[in-house]
Image (cartoon, rainbow, N blue to C red):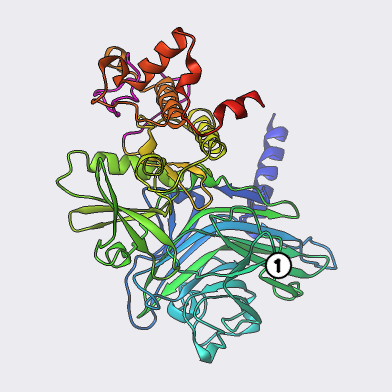
């Protein structure tokens, strides 16, 4: 027994000695963060994880030298070289989503960087143009052993910056060895210029092929969810002299007189393999800081009025993106709660049929939400208010089919069940290609799959609400389907779901169509001149 115990103690001491000699190396060379916790990362400086689980790199403050910096690293080192005589650097790839928020055009700085470094300690580094990585003393020193891909939003000619919004590759300092203006390529290989601090999410891909010694860097706005076929930067570069056997990966950001906020919303990494896919439907929320009052020219052009306030047209100054800004006043009966519901649900959804929320902010007592702009408004306006324009049955059918797929996503495919509770024509918006998009989630309720939800009040719009709702008080997906059915009849018949001026038996559209069906005259429920009957026979 004593012999066995002594052998165990010797083995235990050997393990301790081995751990003391070796860096804290991750047992896995692949990781994925669709959101963050404090324990996921080694944080220093101003870097922190927000309550919504986004990685915020700076606190939005400015200072003189040495500036403010924030660093965030994966907790363990990774093995970038095999312990062989060749010391050849392995292949690696990373993908992440970031947002840089500046208060106004050309007012922010300085940018952030993805880094591979021998240590997560940058206590002697400076903020500002040095990204919290270097200082005047060691900038460019070959002993730094640091690989950097910078996302810079300030042009500094003394550092050979090409413009005020560019991506660059740095070795051991902040003088880029390769850089390109921020841009991405569409499916038809058309190059689109971008702005890094556009206040909207942007994806980035960084890939290094060790055997081929080839580096590729690609970016694209989140609205372009697939990785572009064409890279932004493609360079032959040998990282073997730069990278050690064990290195740390992470991000760094610095501010000085010029101030921006930087958020990393999701991050994945892989060594010698395919980088894990990010779940873009689960991105954490962040305060966009959009200057929406200026974007709407002081709420000048009103697009309409909804249940929670007015909607205005605006243009974001940095990106030129057209937006629809919903303004929820402090005195609104349904304000803060619905505002929180909308940003917590719609803000994380990514579906072609759901109107995208770009961001939100507060201005005084007003709550402001910025959505992607729908140039044709709602199908309600198109059906009943637009003079001299009409939708063919093929167009109407495509819109209805699209909304059906959107409801399937809300009911079955998202992380929680979303009971929209206000599916109606005025909430079906039309984009530039006349595709239907579902918007206004202010009344929605979220619950877990398999749960039995209840509500505390009757909500919805007359003519679209399921009749038994006042008895069951359930915010179920079947209620959404009933509302969708009323919408379908409205679009096919060409009249509103309730028209009080009609006779009692014709006032409610659902009841009218039901009576026509019972009398064998269901074809009378089709709008005249649309050719539905001909289409149906096909």
Residue furthest bottom in the image: 158
Name the quadrant of the N terminus: top right
Would residue 279 be found to the left or right of residue 356 on screen?
A: right
Q: Quadrant of residue 500?
A: top left
Residue density around tag 1, few if under 14, some if 14–19, many if 20 or more, within 10 Å: some
Residue at the image point whose x is 43% and y is 20% from the top: 478
Q: Is residue 232 above or below residue 457?
A: below
- Specify the segment rendered in magenta: 443-468
- Is residue 453 in the magenta section? yes
Would residue 411 be found to the left or right of residue 104 on screen?
A: right
Residue at the image point whose x is 42% and y is 44% from the top: 429
Between 79 and 534, which is closer to the camera in this rendering? 534
Residue furthest top in the image: 518
Residue at the image point whose x is 52% and y is 92% from the top: 158
Measured as percent of width and height from the top left, residue 492 is found at 47, 29
Measured as percent of width and height from the top left, residue 180 is found at 62, 77
Secondary structure under badge 1? strand
Specify the principal SS of the magenta part: loop
Residue furthest front in the image: 529
Residue at the image point whose x is 72% and y is 51% from the top: 274
Q: Which residue is mark 1?
A: 216
Between 291 and 7, which is closer to the camera in this rendering? 291
Residue furthest right in the image: 85
Q: Quadrant of residue 87?
A: bottom right
Name the quadrant of the C terminus: top right
Q: Is residue 34 above or below residue 141?
A: above
Whether residue 22 is visible, yes or no, is no
Whether residue 18 is visible, yes or no, is yes
Measured as percent of width and height from the top left, residue 201 is found at 49, 58
Between 192 and 241, which is closer to the camera in this rendering? 192
- The number of numbered discs placed on residues in the rendered structure image is 1
């Amino acid at each position: 027994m004593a012999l066995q115990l002594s052998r165990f103690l010797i083995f235990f001491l050997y393990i301790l000695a081995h751990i003391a000699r070796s860096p804290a190396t991750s047992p896995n060379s692949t990781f994925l963060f669709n959101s963050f916790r404090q324990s996921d990362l080694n944080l220093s400086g101003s870097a922190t994880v927000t309550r919504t689980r986004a990685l915020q790199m700076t606190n939005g403050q400015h200072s003189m030298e040495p500036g403010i910096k924030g660093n965030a690293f994966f907790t363990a080192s990774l093995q970038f070289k095999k312990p062989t005589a060749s010391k050849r650097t392995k292949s690696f790839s990373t993908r992440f989503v970031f947002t840089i928020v500046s208060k106004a055009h050309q007012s922010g700085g300085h940018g952030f960087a993805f880094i591979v470094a021998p240590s997560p300690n940058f206590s002697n580094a400076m903020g500002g143009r040095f990204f919290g990585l270097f200082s005047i003393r060691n900038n460019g020193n070959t002993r730094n052993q640091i690989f950097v891909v910078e996302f810079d939003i300030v042009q500094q000619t003394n550092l050979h910056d090409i413009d005020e919004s560019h991506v660059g590759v740095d070795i051991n300092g902040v003088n880029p060895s390769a850089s390109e203006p921020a841009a991405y390529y569409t499916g038809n290989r058309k190059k689109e210029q971008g702005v890094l601090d556009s206040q909207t999410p942007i994806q980035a891909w960084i890939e290094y092929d060790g055997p081929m010694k080839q580096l590729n860097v690609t970016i694209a706005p989140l609205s372009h969810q697939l990785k572009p076929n064409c890279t932004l930067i493609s360079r032959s570069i040998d990282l073997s002299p730069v990278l050690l056997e064990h290195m740390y990966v992470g991000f760094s950001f610095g501010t000085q007189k010029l101030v921006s906020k930087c958020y990393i919303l999701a991050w994945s990494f892989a060594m010698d393999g395919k980088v894990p896919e990010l779940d873009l439907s689960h991105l954490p929320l962040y305060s966009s800081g959009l200057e929406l009052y200026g974007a709407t020219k002081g709420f000048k052009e009103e697009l309409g009025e909804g249940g929670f306030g007015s909607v205005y047209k605006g243009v974001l100054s940095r990106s030129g993106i057209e937006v629809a800004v919903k303004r929820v006043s402090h005195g609104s009966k349904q304000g803060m709660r619905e505002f929180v519901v909308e940003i917590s649900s719609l803000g994380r959804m990514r579906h072609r049929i759901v109107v995208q929320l770009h961001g939100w902010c507060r201005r005084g007592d007003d709550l402001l939400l910025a959505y992607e702009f729908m140039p044709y408004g709602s199908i309600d306006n198109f059906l009943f208010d637009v003079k001299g324009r009409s939708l063919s049955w093929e167009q109407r059918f495509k819109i209805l089919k699209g909304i059906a797929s959107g409801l399937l996503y809300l009911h079955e495919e998202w992380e929680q069940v979303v009971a929209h509770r206000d599916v109606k024509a005025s909430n079906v918006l039309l984009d530039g290609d006349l595709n239907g998009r579902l918007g206004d989630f202010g009344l929605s309720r979220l619950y877990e799959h398999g749960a039995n939800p209840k509500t505390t009040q009757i909500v919805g719009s007359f003519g679209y609400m399921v009749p038994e709702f006042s008895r069951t008080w359930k915010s179920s997906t079947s209620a959404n389907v009933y509302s969708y059915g009323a919408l379908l009849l409205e679009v096919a018949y060409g009249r509103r779901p309730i028209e009080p001026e009609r006779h009692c038996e014709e006032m409610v559209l659902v009841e009218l169509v039901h009576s026509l069906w019972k009398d064998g005259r269901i074809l009378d429920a089709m709008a005249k001149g649309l050719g539905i009957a001909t289409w149906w026979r096909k």
